[in-house]
Image (cartoon, helix red, strand yellow):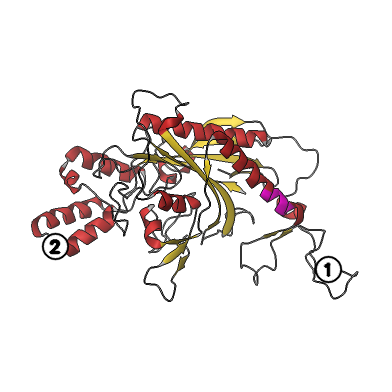
Amino acid sequence: MQLSSYRFFHLFHKLRNHYKFNEISCVYLNHHNYCQQSKSFQPHFNLNLFNDEKFIENLRANLTARKSNLNLDHMLGLYRNYTKTKHTETHDELMSLVCELPNFTHPLTPIGDSSKARHIYIHGSKREERWKLLDVINITSGSHQPVINHHNINSSITINPEGHLRVKDTTLGAGHKTYYFSGPLAQLESALVAYTVDRLKATGFEFVSVPDILPEPVIRACGFQTQGIRSQPITSHFSLLQIYKITPPVSKLSYCLSGTSEMALAGFCAGRSFNCTSKDDKTDESNQSSALGLCSVSRCFRKEAPNQEPTLYRVHQFTKVEMFAITAPSLPVSDAMFNQIIKLQICLFADLGLHFRVLEMPSEELGDSAYRKVDIEAWMPGDQIYGEVS
């Protein structure tokens, strides 16, 4: 079970018609106008801001901080060409590039690569073990040869009781970089999910069951590309080829397996209005009336799983509990909700007795949709690493 890596960001509040709409979540439809949604999730941009020199200066600095490959000068050339010719092809190319712009970056976000991550909080410490540490594979895996139930030779084959994790000989089941849980491990996964959901519901989050298959426009509207070739190294955020695509034979619309249930929650909220009262002058973190919290449990599908990392780290599919929040259009209110989510995560992991650290992630580690990102990494003694758990 893995909690989501909560990404806090506000929308393109200057590049869009609705100046002050902001959002806090892992993934949201950051290129979408909720008040006037079109069926194709078409964004509504204020292209006149390309005439604003200060805006262009900030945009260029942000592209550098996010290590974006987008060519802003080419984009500006397309804009000038479009204002003169009004050609549809030029407009479509320009809008395609605009949709790939990364979000702006929170002032607290360090600028640079992963080495610039800043420690916010450390809980507990590494324990000194007096015996040889084993990783999860050695602890939980046994011989996975089928065992016959000798009380009834005609009964079904049962699982070997010596091992409850299977990571080998899984090609016929689900392919490379996958796993099977059985017995107490499967029960432990379910218990951790139930523990987390119960805590979230007690805090005021509304539980939502979401689909795992989504229309491709929803994925793209969340700020994730579904086409192209990955050229950047794998980081904590999605790359171009991490989305599984499905093309039903009877449908003209492409579908994708959801990489995280925030995508489905974003689709669930799209086109709706929420009564979140804006209180710009108040930053009281107990102000729950200005935010709506949703939570969900889903299977998450990631196409790419690097071989160099531990077997159960960055796999093709896993179960994850998500927190998703909608706030009033106020950065103080959004910041307050974000801090509440961080505190809730810290309490969840602390009550499990884990040693972990909380990191303010730098600009180059943020996905395009992210405004701010805070990771929680737990100490994994078997592998002698800090691994991301949220």
How packed mark 2 is, by other alpha carbons closer than 10 Å (few <14, some 14-19, many 20 or more), is: few
The local secondary structure at tag 1 comes to loop
Along the horizontal axis of the image, is 150 left or right of 250? right
Residue extending farthest to the right is: 151
| 177 versus 65 height, above or below | below
Q: Quadrant of residue 290?
A: top left
Inspect the magenta stretch and tell me whether residue 187 lies in it: yes
| 314 versus 362 height, above or below | below
Residue name at image x 34 percent, y 31 percent: 278
Q: Quadrant of residue 167?
A: bottom right
Which residue in the protein does label 1 denote?
A: 147
For the question of whether residue 249 can be seen, the reply is yes
**Residue 57: image location, x then y, percent:** 23, 40
**Residue 70: image location, x then y, percent:** 30, 53
Which residue in the protein does label 2 denote?
A: 87
Residue name at image x 28 percent, y 49 percent: 36
**How far, Cα to Cα, is label 1 from label 2?**
69 Å
Along the horizontal axis of the image, is 174 left or right of 208? right
Residue name at image x 23 percent, y 49 percent: 45
Q: Quadrant of the C terminus?
A: top right
Closest to the observer: 113 or 93?
93
Residue type marked 2: His
**Residue 162: image location, x then y, percent:** 82, 58
Magenta residues (range): 185-190
For the question of whether residue 108 can be seen, the reply is no
Closest to the observer: 159 or 110?
159
Residue name at image x 44 percent, y 72 percent: 248
Residue type marked 1: Val
Closest to the observer: 250 or 135?
250
